[in-house]
Image (spheres, grey):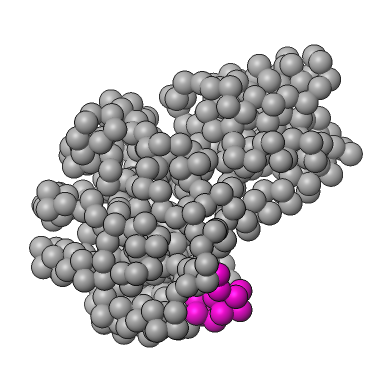
């Protein structure tokens, strides 16, 4: 039987993809399947892929080819799921002969059926775009016990000209509130629930005919097992006064907002089909900081978009100095086929894009170093994420650090347990991280 096989799962891409993989692992465990982290021992390997950018597609294909080497040992079948087959099955089916089963983004629940046919018929199976219900079985969380992601919607209808997501994931689809509440409850005692979607702030518009993001936040906050809530992927044009007020007064919502701006200059924003302006963004930041003085804002920016001038690039540097964001990510524009921006005139040379991204990071390092230096000499509540054995200290995060994408706090303590919160005196700072110690460590030394 398929369920008697030993499974391995590889999840590539973003935190939204991670949630899909966790649900897939949950389905496997629900059926009694055994899993292994040692890929060389697996009889069936499932690779959940990303296809957002060319580098992600290359990583996915490289992973598939690397895993195919295990077929010389115990591996019997390779299943490829997710965004890569969903978008590129026609191009990949023939050359990727190493893959035994292809599933898209909606066919996870058909994995046993397709695998059985693959074994019975000794033929490769393509079930991409055959359809299926939104799977709602319990997840098997792969993050540390003290935080978890909650994917509240899939797809997108913003249609940014550089982005493939709507053509991979389809239109924006909110998951029902009752399903999300049930899923959040099943996560158990969760110190930090991180909300994700392509655009979290549009939650409910498609399903309920109105924006119900604030209502969702209120209902999640009422769950006793959820201690704090972090908001990622909040589009600036949907950050309403109602949402700002909820963040301000709700003690469970961390005073942190991830707002992907992608650019600062009006002409480029219009070419990107982004619904915002430089002045509008600055006014939004001012409004947020006035109502929530301790709020920390992070963002992402794309440099080297077609026809971006040197002056517009320099204006983006000036915007960063004016905006004073603590955490930022910068990316070189990736020319993706089947997007509107792919056909735009004024494509910029790779070396120019890389130079601009490097300069943006250097600008941001100066800003972040100044902002972080203000914490030196102060005490911060820090959640312990684990141990850094090379530095011989503990690793943690304050409310202004999201897992994986922001800086960390390295601290010494007589004792610290993962998931627990500690009062840490900050003794030093650089352009990305903070350093400190607990009172018991200070007394110990």
Q: Main secondary structure of the magenta part?
A: helix
Quick check: 33 left or right of 254?
Answer: right
| Above/below status of 286 relative to 156 | below
Residue 213 at what x, y percent from top left?
Answer: 23, 41
Of 102 and 79, nearer the camera is 102
Quick check: 217 left or right of 351?
Answer: left
Name the residue at 39% across, 84% down: 311
Quick check: 418 left or right of 107?
Answer: left
Residue 254 at what x, y percent from top left?
Answer: 24, 55
Of 77 and 197, nearer the camera is 197
Image quadrant assignment for residue 1: top right
- The total of numbered circles placed on residues is 0
| Above/below status of 72 relative to 272 | above
Q: Kindly tell me whether residue 42 is visible in this rendering.
A: no
Hey, which residue is sitting farthest front in the picture? Answer: 345
Residue 297 at what x, y percent from top left?
Answer: 28, 65
| Above/below status of 250 relative to 274 | above
Indicate whether residue 357 is drawn in magenta: yes
Name the residue at 52% across, 52% down: 339
Residue 70 at what x, y percent from top left?
Answer: 82, 41
Name the residue at 21% across, 53% down: 239
Image quadrant assignment for residue 76: top right
Name the residue at 72% across, 40% down: 92
Q: Which residues are magenta?
A: 347-358
The C terminus: image quadrant? bottom left
């Amino acid at each position: 039987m398929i369920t008697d096989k030993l499974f391995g799962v590889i999840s590539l891409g973003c935190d939204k993809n991670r949630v899909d993989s966790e649900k897939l692992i949950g389905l496997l465990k629900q059926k009694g399947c055994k899993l292994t982290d040692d890929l060389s021992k697996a009889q069936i390997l499932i690779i959940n892929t990303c296809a957002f950018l060319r580098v992600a597609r290359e990583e996915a294909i490289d992973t598939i080819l690397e895993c195919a080497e295990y077929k010389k040992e115990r591996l019997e079948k390779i299943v490829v799921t997710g965004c890569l087959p969903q978008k590129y099955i026609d191009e990949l089916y023939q050359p990727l002969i190493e893959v035994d089963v292809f599933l898209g983004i909606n066919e996870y629940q058909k994995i046993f059926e397709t695998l059985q046919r693959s074994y019975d018929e000794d033929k490769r199976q393509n079930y991409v775009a055959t359809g299926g219900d939104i799977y709602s079985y319990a997840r098997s969380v792969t993050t540390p016990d003290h935080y978890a992601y909650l994917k509240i919607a899939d797809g997108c209808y913003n249609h940014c000209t550089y982005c493939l997501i709507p053509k991979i994931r389809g239109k924006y689809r909110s998951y029902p509130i009752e399903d999300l509440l049930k899923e959040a409850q099943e996560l158990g005692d969760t110190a930090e629930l991180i909300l994700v979607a392509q655009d979290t702030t549009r939650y409910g518009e498609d399903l309920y005919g109105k924006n119900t993001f604030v209502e969702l936040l209120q209902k999640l906050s009422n769950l006793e097992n959820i201690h704090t809530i972090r908001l990622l992927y909040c589009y600036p044009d949907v950050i309403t006064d109602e949402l700002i007020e909820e963040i301000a007064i709700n003690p469970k919502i961390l005073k942190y907002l991830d707002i992907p701006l992608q650019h600062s200059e009006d002409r480029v924003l219009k070419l990107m089909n982004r619904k915002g302006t430089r002045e509008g963004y600055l006014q939004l930041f001012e409004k947020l900081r006035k109502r929530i003085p301790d709020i920390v804002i992070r963002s992402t920016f794309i440099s080297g978009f077609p026809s971006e001038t040197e002056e517009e690039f320099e204006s983006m540097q000036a915007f960063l100095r004016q905006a004073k964001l603590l955490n930022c990510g910068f990316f070189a524009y990736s020319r993706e086929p089947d997007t509107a921006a792919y056909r735009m005139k004024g494509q910029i040379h790779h070396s120019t894009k890389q130079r601009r991204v490097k300069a943006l990071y250097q600008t941001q390092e100066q800003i972040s170093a100044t902002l972080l230096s203000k914490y030196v000499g102060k005490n911060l509540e820090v959640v312990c994420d684990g141990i850094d054995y090379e530095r011989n200290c503990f690793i943690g995060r304050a409310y202004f650090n999201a897992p994986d994408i922001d800086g960390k706090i390295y601290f010494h303590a007589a004792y610290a347990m993962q998931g627990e919160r500690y009062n840490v005196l900050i003794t030093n700072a650089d352009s990305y991280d903070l350093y400190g110690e607990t009172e018991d460590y200070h007394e110990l030394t």
